[in-house]
Image (cartoon, helix red, strand yellow):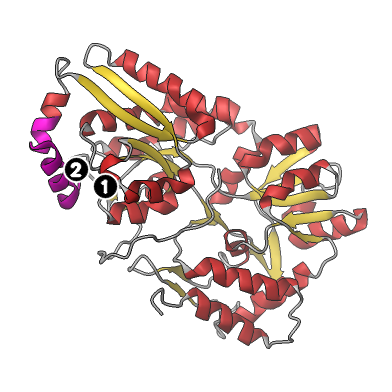
Amino acid sequence: MKKKFLAVIIMITVLAMTLTGCSASDDINVGEEDAEDAVTAENGKSGEAAANEESKGDAGTVALTVWGEEDTLSMLSGMIESFQEHYANDAKFDIALVAQPDAETKGKLLSDVHNGADVFSFPDDQLTALTAAGALVPVPNADEICKANLEEAAEAATLNDTLYAYPMTADNGYFLYYDKKYFTEEDVKSLERILEVAVAAGKKFSMEFSSGWYTYAFFGNTGLEFGINDDGITNYCNWNTTEGKIKGTDIAQALLDITASPAFLNQPDGDFPQSIKNGSVIAGISGVWNAVAVKEAWGDDYGAVKLPTYTCAGQKIQMSSFTGYKMMGVNAYSKQQEWALKLADWLTNEENQTIRFKERNQGPSNINAAASDEVRKVPAIQAVIDQSQYGSLQRVGNDYWEAFMEFAEVILKGNPKKLKLQEIMDNLVAQVTSSAVE
């Protein structure tokens, strides 16, 4: 499941939040002060007393609600059953499993956090808003969880040195698919060469250039700066710089050259499977969610690798990407925090991440699970892992997405108004960095 849009739905006064590493200690209080106070008010008892009561086998039935993607409910049901069997001597459980799209978790939860799920899955780009709202319980065994998972996945679940969720998958990024009937391993190292081969074959190279999620690939490794400000809403960006080895106008010219190729096809990522099925597209940028369709279309000729380089100002630039991770969080307003934390931990452990891979082809964030021979044999998962070293976490403010749609239109049409390239880049940066309240 993809995540392309970060919509900040709350206006808050928020402490400066910067992405950092895992907490250096497991000794983390369960919940931030505001969340803990709210839980205390809800339950009429201290968090410690509630935990003690919850841990007793005779404390009554432990009722929990879990949100998950609809197509994972059958798999999650099996994981929950094994959890209940494991703790059968400690408590009686009543665990409800409810379909909820990960992309909409933040909005659903923050609209009524008191009645939200106890445990829920969500993509990493929702972490800042959920944490700022005091909706997440910090992970109590942070050191253990960090050591068990890929460093990048743990970082994606961390803010201000505190781990706020349990890493679950490490495959929500993009890379290059290609048909081996047309390309050699050397061909797919360069975007220019890919386009040359496609032109000669009368075929297409595909990517969703109109989306800033994908087009970020041309900006991320240029040495220029971009990111979200401490307010969690607005962006900083210098993609219009007139100094340095790579200038803003260099990128604009490179993109005009690339998109002018008769082999370049801008299309929604959702159209990619049909395009490879009908044979019109022989290479393209997408993610693991299309791996099954690619395998069906190309069979043994199915290839997947990190993104290629592209030429900018006479230099070979390794294309970047937004990397993405999914995780399990626990509601700070849960009346069963101790058991909710145990369940979230269970649903994301090595065994269950291995099950996710086998049943849903999801790339594990758990180090041991990701290192298995079975995972290494899947080209798409290996490609997204290889590409991750050249990627960045998606941390963007509101105005980024719309700004990129307008920028892409100008580029794709070949700059029809003949604007100066500096003006094109100035316009892009002005929109990307604009204030949400202007």
The quarter of the picture where the C terminus appears is bottom left
| Mark 1 crowdedness (10 Å alpha carbons): few <14, some 14-19, many ≥20 | many
Tell me the residue at 40%/28% (across/down): 97
Closer mark to the observer between disc 1 and disc 2: 2
| x and y percentages locating residue 308 in the rendered image | 69, 56
Q: Name the amino acid, label 1.
A: Ser
Residue 397 lies in what quarter of the image? bottom left
Provide the residue designation for mark 1.
23
| x and y percentages locating residue 123 in the rendered image | 45, 47
Tell me the residue at 70%/56% (across/down): 207
One can see residue 132 in this view: yes
Tell me the residue at 44%/60% (across/down): 7
Which residue, as the protein is rendered here, is positioned at the far top? 89
Left or right position of 123 against 129: right
- Against 414, residue 66 (above or below) is above
Q: What segment is highlighted magenta in the picture?
A: 30-50
Question: Looking at this view, is 287 or 405 the one in front?
Answer: 405
Left or right position of 278 against 133: right
Please check the rendered image and state whether residue 166 is part of the magenta-colored stretch, yes or no: no
Residue 377 lies in what quarter of the image? top right
Question: Looking at this view, is 73 or 284 the one in front?
Answer: 73
Asked if the residue under mark 2 is in contact with the one under mark 1, i.e. CB atoms within 8 Å, the reply is yes
The quarter of the picture where the N terminus appears is top right
| Marks 1 and 2, the one that precedes in the sequence | 1
| Mark 2 crowdedness (10 Å alpha carbons): few <14, some 14-19, many ≥20 | some
For the stretch drawn in magenta, the main secondary structure is helix
Residue 29 lies in what quarter of the image? top left
Provide the residue designation for mark 2.
28
| x and y percentages locating residue 195 in the rendered image | 81, 60
| x and y percentages locating residue 296 in the rendered image | 76, 33
